[in-house]
Image (cartoon, rainbow, N blue to C red):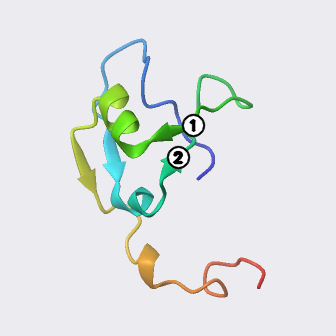
């Protein structure tokens, strides 16, 4: 994922929801305050640090797309 906003350490309290499509990875790299920084976290760490309210399915049908459907080179 790119173009994200850091889900923790926010200046004001915001509701954070985590997308279930991330559960296919052992670790993720959320934004970390600037355009060129990130931090590697387990999903448990991401959930804990972000205060995520729930896992939701924002990226509908992500698990049914093939590489050619998603615009990625084979």
Which residue appears farthest toward the top when viewing the image?
11
Task: Mark 2 or mark 1: name the one nearer the start of the chain.
Answer: 2
Question: 11 or 43, which lies in front?
Answer: 43
The residue under the point 59% across, 32% down is 39
**Which residue is nearer to you in this view: 27 or 68?**
27
The residue where tag 1 is placed is 40
Tell me, yes or no, whether the two marked residues, 2 and 1, touch with CB atoms within 8 Å.
yes
Tell me: 10 left or right of 40.
Answer: left
Q: Residue furthest left?
A: 53
Identity of the residue drawn at 69% across and 78% down: 71
| Mark 2 nearby-residue class (10 Å; few <14, some 14–19, many ≥20) | some
Q: Tell me if residue 26 comes above or below residue 72 in the rendering.
A: above
**Between 21 and 60, which is closer to the camera in this rendering?**
21
- Percent x, y of residue 12: 36, 14
Say above or below: 71 vs 18.
below
To which residue does mark 2 refer? 28
Image-based side of 7 in relation to 13, left or right? right
Query: Which residue is drawn at the image coordinates 59% and 26% (left, top)?
Result: 32
- Residue 21 pos. (x, y %): 41, 63
Specify few, some or many for label 1: CA neighbours under 10 Å numbering under 14, 14-19, or 20 or more.
few
**Number of the label disc, if any, that sits on residue 8:** none
């Amino acid at each position: 994922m790119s173009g994200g906003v850091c889900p923790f350490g926010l200046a004001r309290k915001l509701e954070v929801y985590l997308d279930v499509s991330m559960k296919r990875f052992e670790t993720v790299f959320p934004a970390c305050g600037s355009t060129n920084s990130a931090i590697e976290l387990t999903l448990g760490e991401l959930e804990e640090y972000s205060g995520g309210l729930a896992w939701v399915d924002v990226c509908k049908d992500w698990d049914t797309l093939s590489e050619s459907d998603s615009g990625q080179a084979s």
